[in-house]
Image (cartoon, grey):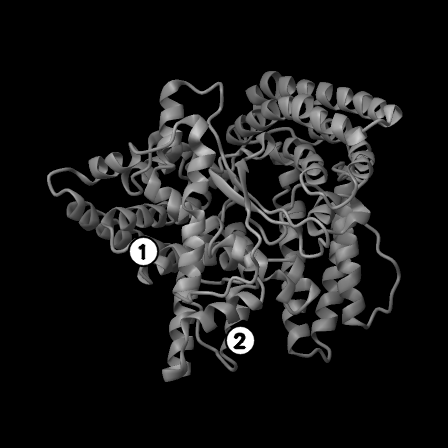
């Protein structure tokens, strides 16, 4: 996950405001950003963008790049001026965001190489209007109709812009587009019929717009399969220099790549040996693979996947409270449901929480990805085995308590608009991954080695992502060879291993889970050393979460004033 996920680009203009006022610049920056990415304005709770859809034309890219270069110059000028500590943090965050977006648009040109960006956009933009009750349904349907009318243009821009993507990207785009057909034809249509109520004209407008959108998605799916896939021969590797720049801009991490890889390989080996030892404790007569397979055999059936995710969620939440691990600042629970079809791009589970500026709709969705109807029986079984009972607990810790959902519950306490609307993946994903290990250290699972084995498998999964991402993009590794790492060192099922490795092709720096976890542990130890006898784990966690999802480098300066130590 990026600090602000970049799916599409558009021409954005900001109102003229004083050019020497950082507060005014922040407003201009986000006005321009959400004008460019209106579906993310909706997600943030800024509903003046609801009736717009991203303009993803080449013309829009050029205009956005020009605007970003001007903003980069301005924020650097403002940083050099008299900003307070909070302003310096926010300026550094925005500067990095701009650099990351320019890297994507102007250097890597992902808008020319990744069809997933296009086919995933309409479903997310439409679903964002349906799933949260932030306004009367008929009002949201009017916005939905406006977005539907723009869907054919988005998919035409894909044809115009994308020419030689990697095969891996096109394969996933086909899956996403195919699933989106049914989403628009069935799910969206059913919702719209109810939302229209007795307004026949509004429903008729929807039906015409949705028919055109469905036809556009069907046509795009056929184009992806028959036209683009045969000529998808591009390389996904971004190279060492761009990999290092992406990591610097998105995570403020400047560790040399050779040392970064050595850190990851050492951590993988440590967790691998711990996994083998824990498997021996469970059954010394069986291999580690067989022990993990015996755990995985206790998995839900396809129709029991969502109930399985719900099963232990409340007990995990109560554990946090009883053990005083972190303050949970709300009684509202997340809604557990299936991952929408348009979002099934190799993700097994995720948390979709309302935006920081959402004032009415409090629904947060804990998504779990179901089996696909077209999969063969072997693939379905391997997918479901991932959701065995101990691993399901780890997933729920990561996604909900005290992971991403608890992070969201703190958003109202974040000290600035910039921190409410942006995040660093090594912070938020690092926190969620840190939570898995930390919870066991604090007694979750009662010392059951099966729970420990599940936690270690989740750790190994992230360790393998760390290694795979670096080697896929800087050492010429193939997706197939990367999948072997997940099987041999991560004890993953082959089908899941391939999904994980392929994700690394389009998400280069997905090492941020392990990277962030290690940075948080080091920060905690340094914080504990500074506090001495007054150290309190719950206080550390609360203080960490209140600051927002800023890079750990900046977090250290807040929690450890004057700190100059490295993040690792």
Residue at horizontal 47%, vertical 59%? 431
> Tag 2, which secondary structure?
helix
Q: Percent position (x, y) of residue 455?
A: 33, 50
Residue 254 appears anywhere in the view: yes
What residue would you read off at disc 2?
A: 557
- The answer to whether 383 appears left or right of 145 in the picture is left
Residue at horizontal 57%, vertical 68%? 547
- The answer to whether 49 appears left or right of 496 in the picture is right
Callout 1 environment at 10 Å: few (<14), some (14 to 19), or many (20+)?
Answer: some
- The answer to whether 476 appears left or right of 294 in the picture is right
Residue at horizontal 58%, vertical 33%? 340
Q: Is residue 159 above or below residue 66?
A: above
Q: Is residue 62 above or below residue 227?
A: below
Callout 2 environment at 10 Å: few (<14), some (14 to 19), or many (20+)?
Answer: some
Q: Earlier in the sequence, mark 1 or mark 2?
A: 1
Identify which residue, 300 or 234, lies in the foreground. 300
Q: Percent position (x, y) of residue 298?
A: 30, 34
What residue would you read off at disc 1?
A: 267
Quadrant for the C terminus in the image = bottom left
**Residue 14 occupies quadrant:** bottom right
Q: CA distance from mark 1 to mark 2?
A: 26 Å
> Tag 1, which secondary structure?
helix
Label of residue 93 in the image: none
Q: How many labels, in total?
A: 2
Q: Percent position (x, y) of residue 5?
A: 62, 47
Residue at horizontal 67%, vertical 47%? 106
Could you tell me if the residues under marks 1 and 2 are in contact, i.e. CB atoms within 8 Å? no
Residue 244 appears anywhere in the view: no
**Residue 443 occupies quadrant:** bottom left
């Amino acid at each position: 996950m990026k600090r602000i996920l970049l799916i599409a680009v558009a021409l954005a203009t900001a109102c003229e405001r004083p050019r020497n006022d950082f507060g005014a610049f922040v407003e201009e920056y986000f006005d321009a950003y959400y004008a460019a990415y209106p579906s993310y304005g909706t997600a943030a709770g800024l509903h003046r963008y609801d009736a717009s859809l991203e303009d993803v034309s080449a013309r829009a890219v050029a205009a956005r790049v020009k605007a970003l270069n001007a903003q980069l110059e301005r924020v650097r000028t403002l940083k050099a001026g008299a900003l307070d500590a909070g302003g310096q943090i926010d300026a550094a965050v925005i500067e990095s965001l701009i650099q990351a977006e320019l890297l994507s648009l102007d250097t890597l040109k992902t808008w020319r190489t990744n069809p997933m960006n296009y086919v995933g956009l309409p479903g997310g933009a439409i679903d964002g209007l349906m799933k949260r009750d932030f306004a009367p349904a008929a009002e949201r349907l009017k916005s939905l109709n406006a977005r539907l009318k723009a869907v054919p243009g988005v998919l035409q821009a894909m044809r115009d812009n994308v020419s030689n993507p990697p095969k891996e990207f096109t394969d996933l785009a086909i899956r996403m587009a195919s699933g989106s057909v049914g989403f628009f034809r069935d799910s969206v249509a059913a919702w719209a019929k109810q939302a229209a109520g007795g307004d026949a004209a509004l429903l008729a407008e929807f039906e015409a717009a949705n028919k055109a959108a469905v036809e556009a998605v069907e046509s795009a799916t056929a184009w992806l399969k028959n036209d683009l896939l045969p000529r998808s021969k591009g390389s996904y590797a971004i190279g060492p220099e761009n990999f290092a720049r992406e990591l610097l801009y998105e995570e403020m991490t400047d560790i040399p790549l050779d040392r970064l890889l050595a850190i990851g390989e050492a951590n993988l080996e440590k967790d691998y040996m711990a996994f083998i030892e824990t498997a021996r404790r469970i059954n010394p007569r069986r291999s580690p693979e067989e022990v993990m397979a015996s755990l995985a055999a206790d998995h839900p059936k396809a129709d029991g996947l969502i109930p399985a995710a719900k099963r232990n969620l409340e007990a995990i939440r109560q554990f946090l409270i009883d053990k005083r691990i972190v303050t949970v600042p709300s009684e509202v629970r997340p809604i557990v449901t299936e991952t929408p079809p348009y979002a099934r791009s190799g993700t097994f589970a995720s948390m979709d929480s309302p935006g920081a500026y959402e004032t009415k709709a409090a629904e947060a969705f804990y998504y779990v990805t179901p089996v696909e109807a077209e999969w063969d029986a072997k693939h379905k079984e391997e997918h479901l085995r991932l959701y065995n009972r101990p691993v399901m607990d780890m997933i729920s810790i990561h996604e909900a308590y005290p992971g991403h959902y608890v992070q969201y519950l703190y958003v109202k306490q974040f000290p600035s608009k910039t921190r409410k609307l942006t995040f660093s993946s090594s912070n938020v994903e690092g926190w969620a991954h840190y939570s898995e290990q930390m919870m066991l250290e604090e007694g979750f699972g009662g010392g059951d080695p099966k729970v420990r084995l599940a936690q270690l498998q989740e750790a190994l999964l992230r360790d393998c992502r760390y290694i795979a991402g670096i080697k896929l993009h800087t050492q010429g590794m193939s997706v197939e060879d990367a999948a072997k790492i997940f099987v041999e060192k991560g004890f993953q099922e082959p089908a899941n291993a391939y999904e994980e490795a392929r994700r690394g092709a389009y998400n280069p720096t997905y090492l941020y889970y392990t990277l962030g976890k290690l940075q948080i542990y080091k920060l905690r130890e340094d914080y504990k050393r500074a506090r001495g006898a007054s150290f309190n784990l719950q206080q550390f966690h609360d203080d960490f979460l209140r600051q927002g999802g800023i890079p750990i480098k900046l977090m250290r300066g807040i929690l450890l004033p004057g700190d100059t130590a490295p993040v690792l």
